[in-house]
Amino acid sequence: MNDRLPHEKGFHVSWDQLHRDARALAWRLDGHGPDEGGWRAVVGITRGGLVPAMIVSRELDIRVVDTISVKSYSHQAQKAPVVTKSPQADLMGDGTGILIVDDLVDTGKTLELVRSLYPKAHFATVYSKPQGRKQVDTFVTEVSQDTWIFFPWDMALQYVQPFRGAD
């Protein structure tokens, strides 16, 4: 019997680990863009994709960076995603040569929405869950669907109860 709450199967990501994983993502993407291996721009999906997008853009020396804001969570409950801010239309076109970066693909609904807008873009995430895996082109680490990823911007230093027992 599993007496844990869903978020108790947690994968805690430190700032150092996120930086290493985002650099690993950049290494996988290096030389794979359509313009002689280069990318025209990086677009981070806010909010979680901002940090990895910045790291990828720095590592690949991509100076054109924009954002797309998609809201799909409200008080930790997932809802239908909605675009609240679009990137520059003249930059995006159909997405050719554009690298779209997010921290995580979970169910795939956010990437599905963004892919419908920019079908020729390349979608990259640092972390992937199986249900959303088909929506991402490149990722670094896959975790199980029932794993909750705790990102460093969501965390504070405090005592953590052991996984099993009280010792």
Image (cartoon, grey):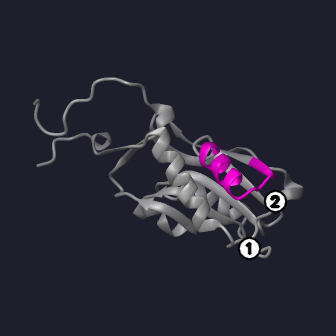
| Residue of label 1 | 37
Q: Is residue 122 left or right of residue 9?
A: right
Earlier-in-chain disc, 1 versus 2 = 1
In the rendered view, tell whether residue 87 sits above or below residue 167. Answer: below
Residue that protrudes farthest toward the top in the picture: 158
Q: Nearer the viewer, residue 84 or 60?
A: 60
Q: Is residue 90 left or right of residue 25?
A: right
Q: Do labels 1 and 2 touch, CB within 8 Å?
A: no
Mark 2 crowdedness (10 Å alpha carbons): few <14, some 14-19, many ≥20: many
Q: Report the residue at 32% width, 40% height from top.
A: 7
Q: Nearer the viewer, residue 73 or 9?
A: 9
Q: Report the residue at 28% width, 24% height from top.
A: 159
Residue 114, horizontal then vertical, whole percent: 66, 58
| Residue of label 2 | 92
Residue 105, horizontal then vertical, whole percent: 51, 56
In the rendered view, tell whether residue 154 sits above or below residue 2. Answer: above
| Residue 61 on the magenta segment | yes
Residue 155, horizontal then vertical, whole percent: 43, 30
- State the image quarter where residue 8 is shown: top left
Local SS, label 1 = loop
Q: Count the numbered circles shown.
A: 2
Q: Report the residue at 33% width, 23% height from top.
A: 158
Mark 1 crowdedness (10 Å alpha carbons): few <14, some 14-19, many ≥20: few
Residue 125, horizontal then vertical, whole percent: 55, 57
| Residue 157 on the magenta segment | no
- State the image quarter where residue 69 is shown: top right
Quadrant assignment for the C terminus: top left
- In magenta, the rendered stretch is 50-66
Residue type at mark 1: give it: Gly
